[in-house]
Image (cartoon, grey):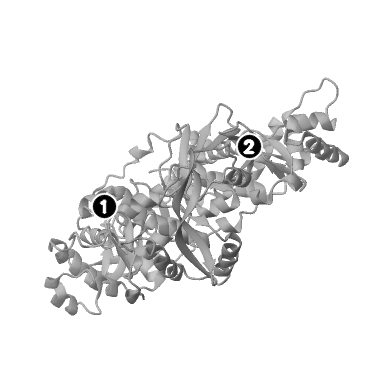
């Protein structure tokens, strides 16, 4: 019989960290007298549970009979269900069952001990069934996975359970992925953290924890920074609202909350979307290709352009909301270029590909964007639809940002303009100095009015379908065939509302008034409007 | 609530009949849409009847509408059951009917339905939102 600690059922559903487990962890940290990572604590706990089951194995084997449909079972009898990850249950009732092919048999109701209603199983059923022919010998006790292997297989569930229990306990303190004992934390004078504040201020940039410890004068002459001191200072800084960690994974860099741009912790409204639902099964090949082609952080990663972690250069198309607030999307395609952390936004440097000048950039992984490009967009007069090139450098904390420059020329572009509180589009000549995606290109003649219209559309929660119906005629009049490309529709809708391509495409395929043409182009027939 | 584990191409799926019971949805009404022309008379005779369906892999029993059995026995032989015009989600549900709800991976569902791709099938049924009770096997 398979041991329960060898099953997904145990680690993903039954595993709970109890008081005895917390004592084990407490003693482990106490013995080591230094912060211990969540990984190490969790693996130790998995090993502890496996060892306990080893001891209890014989008792488990005597718990009950293995379930087979051909057998009969008595009320109150305990049964082990091999096909349900060796869950056990007690028979609480039985009745006669009926099947059109097999006739009558017994149906037993089994309380699975999980608080749910009893499950019903076939019994006295001698017909062909997988479980009637399987061999349930004890041979499958061989080849047990090690605690480390079990941990790797069920890591997410185990880590969540251990992390939750330790965080809820008053005995432990946490900084990033390490835990330590609250009672063992050294105490520091409050004034030392005023020194840390001033040190960062004077530095005009973030400082590593070891540098701060030195400036705070915590160490005795000749003393080196211990793990406990480093953890304790980090813990105190993390719990002091003046300080924020802005370092990438594996590096703690302390900065001041008061000089951190608000967009780093509060996503601009322009980037917030309330539309997320779409079903790729409803899309034809053209729409699927476009969904992947459009660089939008709200598209599900499975549906976006695939990641290439080795790509040193990535080119993306700037959309209206990102153009407006000076950001770029983090998608599977761009993610690997930016330094990131599981715990905090990361401060890094953009390097201007034209001039070599550097300016601050922020990776905001929680909301999938990088911030800090507003002035750069304005300085280079980049339009919506511009191709933006991102390049990796040898320094992981620097990312080159560039555009594809051309000689300044006058092109006909889609010009958005608010007229009588309505968003309209016209083709107007405009001076441009870069390469761009013609289908996405939009200029905004009345940005202040557009902003008001956007706020109004958001507050009124105008349904997406109505927005598309209103905008479609504006866009189709710009084209002699009266067609609109799905990408252009996406770009134009995003002048008024933040919507990913998926929900827009879902509206296109869900209403008869939108008629697909070839190669991603659509027409609109208002007579067919729902 | 059960923890969500992201399904893969190797994850087995089935129709969870308890989902239909919990949601209070009418399985018979939904099954009507899968009847072939030849079975309409037999289907009418099954009105109001149920039977004890036995899971082919766990032995669990669910009392469900007899229309399931009528369709399972007859309709998969109809050439239109997996016709190219049948939408993907419908074809996936029919694959489970044809297989008497024995668990199937997205790859196996693709082999039965010959629609789109295994990856597309996974994306369709592997989301948190459950479509017509089709869920990963526990």
Residue at the (61%, 49%) spot, across then down: A164
Cα gap from disc 1 to disc 2, whole angstroms: 43 Å
Q: Residues within 10 Å of mark 2 (few under 14, many from 20)?
A: many
Depth check: give the residue in front, A90 or A116: A116
Q: Secondary structure at mark 2?
A: strand
Depth check: give the residue in front, A44 or B95: B95
Q: Pinpoint residue A427: horizontal percent, then vertical percent.
A: 44, 58
Q: Is residue B117 above or below residue A122?
A: above
Residue A193, quarter of the rendered image: top right
Taking the image as shown, residue A77 lies to the left or right of residue A206, namely left
Depth check: give the residue in front, A179 or B89: B89
Please give the chain letter of the residue carrying mark 2: A
Residue A503, quarter of the rendered image: bottom left
Q: Residues within 10 Å of mark 1 (few under 14, many from 20)?
A: few
Quarter of the image with the N terminus of chain A in it:
top left
Q: Pinpoint residue A157: horizontal percent, then vertical percent.
A: 51, 47
Q: Pinpoint residue A350: horizontal percent, then vertical percent.
A: 60, 36
Depth check: give the residue in front, B41 or A42: B41
Residue A119 in view? yes
Residue B66 in view? no
Q: Which mark is residue A348?
A: 2
Which residue bears the numbered disc 1? B116
Q: Residue furthest top?
A: A222
């Amino acid at each position: 019989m398979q041991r329960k600690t060898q099953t997904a059922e145990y680690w993903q559903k039954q595993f709970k960290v109890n008081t005895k487990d917390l004592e084990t962890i407490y003693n482990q940290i106490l013995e080591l007298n230094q912060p211990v990572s969540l990984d190490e604590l969790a693996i130790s706990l998995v090993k502890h549970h496996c060892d306990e089951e080893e001891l209890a194995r014989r008792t488990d084997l005597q718990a009950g009979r293995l379930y087979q449909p051909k057998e009969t079972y008595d009320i109150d009898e305990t049964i082990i269900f091999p096909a349900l990850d060796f869950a056990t249950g007690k028979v609480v009732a039985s009745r006669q069952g009926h099947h059109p092919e097999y006739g009558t048999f017994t149906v037993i109701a089994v309380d699975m001990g999980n608080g749910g209603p009893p499950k019903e199983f076939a019994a006295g059923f001698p017909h062909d069934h997988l479980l009637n022919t399987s061999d349930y010998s004890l041979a499958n006790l061989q080849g047990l996975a090690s605690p480390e292997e079990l941990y790797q297989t069920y890591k997410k569930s185990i880590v969540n359970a251990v992390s939750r229990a330790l965080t809820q306990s008053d005995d432990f303190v946490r900084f990033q992925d390490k835990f330590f004992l609250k009672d063992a934390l050294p105490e520091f004078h409050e004034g030392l953290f005023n020194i840390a504040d001033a040190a960062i201020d004077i530095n005009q940039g973030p400082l590593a924890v070891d540098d701060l410890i030195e400036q705070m004068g915590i160490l005795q002459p000749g003393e080196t920074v211990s793990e406990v001191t480093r953890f304790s200072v980090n813990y105190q800084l993390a719990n002091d609202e003046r300080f924020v960690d802005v370092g990438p994974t594996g590096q703690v860099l302390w900065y001041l909350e008061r000089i951190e741009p608000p967009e780093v912790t509060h996503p601009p409204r322009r980037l917030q979307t309330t539309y997320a639902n779409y079903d790729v099964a409803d899309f034809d090949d053209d729409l699927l290709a476009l969904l992947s082609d459009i660089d939008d952080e709200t598209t599900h990663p499975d549906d976006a352009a695939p990641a290439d972690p080795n790509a040193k250069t990535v080119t993306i198309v700037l959309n209206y909301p990102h153009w407006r607030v000076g950001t770029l999307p983090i998608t599977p395609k761009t993610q690997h270029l930016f330094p990131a952390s599981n715990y905090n936004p990361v401060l890094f440097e953009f390097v201007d590909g034209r001039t070599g000048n550097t300016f601050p950039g922020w990776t905001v992984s929680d909301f999938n964007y990088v911030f800090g490009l507003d002035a750069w967009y304005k300085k280079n007069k980049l339009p919506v639809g511009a191709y933006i090139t991102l390049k990796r450098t040898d320094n992981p904390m620097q990312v080159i940002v560039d555009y594809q420059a051309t000689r300044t020329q006058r092109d006909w572009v889609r010009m958005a303009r608010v007229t009588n509180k309505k968003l309209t589009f016209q083709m107007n000549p405009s001076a441009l100095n870069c390469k761009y995606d013609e289908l996405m290109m939009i200029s905004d003649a009345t940005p202040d009015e557009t902003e008001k219209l956007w706020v109004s559309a958001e507050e009124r929660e105008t349904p997406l379908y109505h927005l598309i119906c209103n905008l479609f005629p504006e866009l189709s009049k710009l084209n002699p065939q009266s067609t609109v490309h799905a990408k252009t529709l996406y770009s134009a809708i995003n002048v008024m509302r933040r919507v990913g391509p998926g929900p827009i495409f879902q509206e296109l395929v869900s209403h008869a008034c939108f008629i697909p043409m070839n190669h991603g182009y659509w027409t609109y027939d208002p007579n067919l409007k729902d | 609530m059960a923890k969500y584990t992201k399904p893969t191409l190797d994850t087995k799926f089935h129709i969870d009949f308890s989902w239909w019971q919990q949601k209070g949805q009418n399985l018979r009404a939904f099954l009507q849409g899968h009847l072939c022309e030849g079975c309409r008379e037999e289907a009418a005779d099954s009105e109001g009847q149920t039977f004890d369906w036995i899971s082919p892999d766990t032995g669990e029993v669910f009392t469900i509408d007899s229309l399931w059995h009528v369709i399972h026995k007859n309709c998969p032989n109809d050439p239109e059951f997996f016709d190219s015009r049948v939408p993907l989600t419908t074809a996936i549900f029919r694959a489970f009917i044809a297989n008497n709800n024995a668990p199937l991976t997205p790859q196996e569902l693709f082999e039965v339905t010959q629609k789109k791709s295994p990856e597309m099938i996974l994306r369709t049924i592997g989301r948190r939102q459950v479509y017509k009770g089709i869920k990963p096997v526990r």
